[in-house]
Image (cartoon, grey):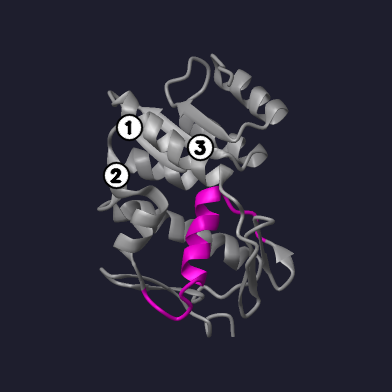
Amino acid sequence: MFEATSGNEALRAVSARRPDIIVLDLGLPDVDGQELLPAIRGVSDAVLIVLSVRDAQQEKIAALDAGADDYLTKPFDFAELAARLRANRRKGLSTPNPAILECGDLALDDAAHRVTWNGSNVRLTPKEFDLLKELMRYPDKVVSHAHLLEKLWGHVHSDETAYLRVYIQRLRRKLIEVGASKYLIDSEPAVGYRLNTSGHL
């Protein structure tokens, strides 16, 4: 475990030490944490939890869209932060599932934590990877908002569909960048999302 006291120091430390989990306070002395997020994401795929006094929904969405995996508003209960850290640690220490999921040109190798579209690598954050894996487990079936929120974030965010919307948008964008159809992931309004096996045709 290590601590950085400024944004620039944090970025250097993340690049050099490659942590598994990053807890980022947006209130930094030298740079706005929102501006630092994309830079951290450019050098690390670690689980990234944001802390901030900013509780406006647009601030949370902006942080998630910039690469954060979770957002905790100050003042917060340290027990809740510890629980979220433990949950992510359990995910990182769990025995990898060797299964390879395939859906047309889309393939997900759980053991290697690798996603490809028609042979091209798709770089995903841990949460994006887990979201795609859950959708690929139920091809052509609608997976409910509640199921996805519970599976990825637990009961803490069980009613925050804005989290899902941000991650689905990011996932779609990254898949489109490597040639996937924008219809690969369909939305069922007020219900959930579907990985459409005909969406790659």
Q: Nearer the viewer, mark 2 or mark 3?
A: 2
Q: Position of residue 27 (x, y in %)?
A: 42, 21
The 10 Å Cα crowd at callout 3, few under 14, some 14 to 19, many 20 or more, is: many
- The residue shown at (56%, 43%) is 92
Does residue 118 sit above or below 2 in this rendering? below
Look at the image and tell me in which quarter the N terminus lies.
Answer: top right
Secondary structure under tag 1 reads: helix
How many residues crowd mark 2 within 10 Å: few (<14), some (14–19), many (20+)? few
Q: Within the image, what quadrant is residue 19 found in?
A: top right
Look at the numbered discs 1 and 2 and tell me whether their residues touch, using CB distance below 8 Å: yes
Task: Identify the disc placed on residue 156.
Answer: 2
**Residue at the spot of label 3:** 48
Mark 1 — residue?
Answer: 80
- Image coordinates of residue 180 in percent, x first then y, are 60, 73
Could you classify mark 1 by the number of other residues whose Cα lies within 10 Å: few (under 14), some (14-19), or many (20 or more)?
Answer: few
Q: Is residue 27 left or right of residue 13?
A: left
Distance between mark 2 and mark 3 Cα atoms: 17 Å
Q: CA distance from mark 1 to mark 2?
A: 9 Å
Residue nearest the viewer, comparing 57 with 156: 156
Q: Earlier in the sequence, mark 3 or mark 1?
A: 3
Residue at the spot 40% in from the left edge and 37% down from the top edge:
84
Q: Which residues are magenta?
A: 122-142
In the image, what residue type sits under mark 2? Answer: Val
Q: Quadrant of residue 113?
A: bottom right
Nearer to us in this view, 46 or 109? 109
Helix, strand or loop for disc 2: helix
Identify residue type, mark 1.
Glu
